[in-house]
Amino acid sequence: MNGDLILTKTARGILGILAILGSLAWATAIPAAASVTSTAASAAATSTFRDVATLFCLDSNANGNAYTLGCNGGNFQNWEFGGSNTTSTIRNVSTGLCLDSNTEGKVYTLGCNGGNFQKWEISGSGGRVRNVSTGFCLDSNTEGKVYTLRCNGGNFQNWQHR
């Protein structure tokens, strides 16, 4: 009888341990599943950004320069971002560098760091692209220069992305 009692207590102990391990496995599986869902939901869009006034596309190179050129379909003119009506980084597909700016209105690309100078509010296609940190809008001219200025609603500050 004592042997049966010890065996029953041991079985209960093992079942208790298995129940705890099962709970831990379930608890860790839920965040993992949630992160897969949120990653899929936040997948970046890939697009070109074309200035409405000049019809030039936002371009970049491995040296960190940002400028506009005639649209040519090359990867230096392809950018990943969160999509229309979002605030996100704008990352160059070829270089992996993020569009960045400063309070002087300069625009360039740097290694992505998650800072506000690399975050942009992106309006619908044909709308403005505004830097979160400075509040200035992405702007360009017919010479291919890219910079930021106070938002003025002009077509040089409107960018189509698709």
Image (tube, rainbow, N blue to C red):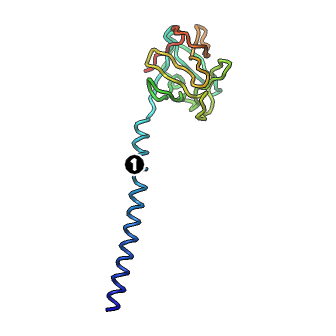
The image shows a total of numbered marks equal to 1
In the picture of the structure, the residue carrying the numbered disc 1 is 33
Viewer-proximal residue, 60 or 119? 119
Residue 162 percent coordinates (x, y)? 43, 21
Snapshot quadrant of residue 100: top right
The percent position of residue 26, horizontal first and vertical second, equals 38, 57
Quarter occupied by residue 104: top right
In the picture provided, is 142 more to the left or to the right than 125? right
Q: Quadrant of the N terminus?
A: bottom left
Vertical position of residue 77 compared to residue 19: above or below? above
User: What amino acid is labelled 1 in the image?
Assistant: Ala
Identify the element where label 1 is drawn. helix
Name the residue rendered at 50%, 13% in the picture.
158
Instruction: Name which quarter of the figure residue 69 lies in.
Output: top right
Going 61% across and 22% down the picture, which residue do you hit?
134
Q: Position of residue 24 (x, y in %)?
A: 42, 61
Question: Does 130 sit above or below residue 12?
Answer: above
> Which residue is farthest bottom?
1
**Residue 160 on image: x %, y %:** 46, 16
Q: Nearer the viewer, residue 131 or 142?
A: 131
Residue at the (51%, 29%) spot, across then down: 88
Q: Residues within 10 Å of mark 1 (few under 14, many from 20)?
A: few
The residue closer to the viewer here, 161 or 14, is 14
